[in-house]
Image: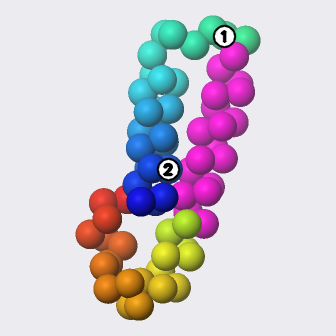
Amino acid sequence: MLLQSVRDAILYHEGLLRSETIRPHERADYEEYYVHLTQFLEILKKEYRAVENDVGVPLADLHV
């Protein structure tokens, strides 16, 4: 569930960064947060792969 939540946050921020709703002086903060989210997702994927066989659900089936 954590993997999918972070993935959803990434998708939301991708859309937000493409929109014109962010003020120019706020854009850098949103971009930095987006980078942190993508890095966090990669860490979570790595951790999940370590227990993937125990869990019994392949990472690919989680659609992240």
* 40 lies above or below 35: below
Comparing labels 1 and 2, the label whose residue is closer to the camera: 2
Callout 1 crowding tier (Cα within 10 Å): few <14, some 14–19, many ≥20: few
Q: Who's the residue at 41% across and 91% down the image?
A: 54
Q: Which residues are magenta?
A: 26-43
The dot on residue 53 is none
Residue type, numbered disc 2: Val
Left or right relative to 23: residue 18? left
Q: Secondary structure at mark 1?
A: helix
Identify the residue under disc 1.
Answer: 24
- Whole-percent x, y for residue 7 in the image: 44, 50
Where residue 25 sits in the image (x, y, percent)? Answer: 73, 12
Residue at the left extreme of this rendering = 61
Rendered residue at 44%/33% (across/down): 12
C-alpha distance separating marks 1 and 2: 25 Å
Rendered position, 42 above or below 21: below
Q: Quadrant of the N terminus?
A: bottom left
Q: Main secondary structure of the magenta part?
A: helix
Q: Residue 15: x percent and y percent?
A: 42, 27
In the image, farthest residue toward the bottom: 54
Residue at position x 45%, y 50% in the image: 5
- Residue 32 located within the stretch drawn in magenta: yes
| Residue to which mark 2 is pinned | 6
**What kind of element bears circle 2?**
helix
Quadrant of image for the C terminus: bottom left
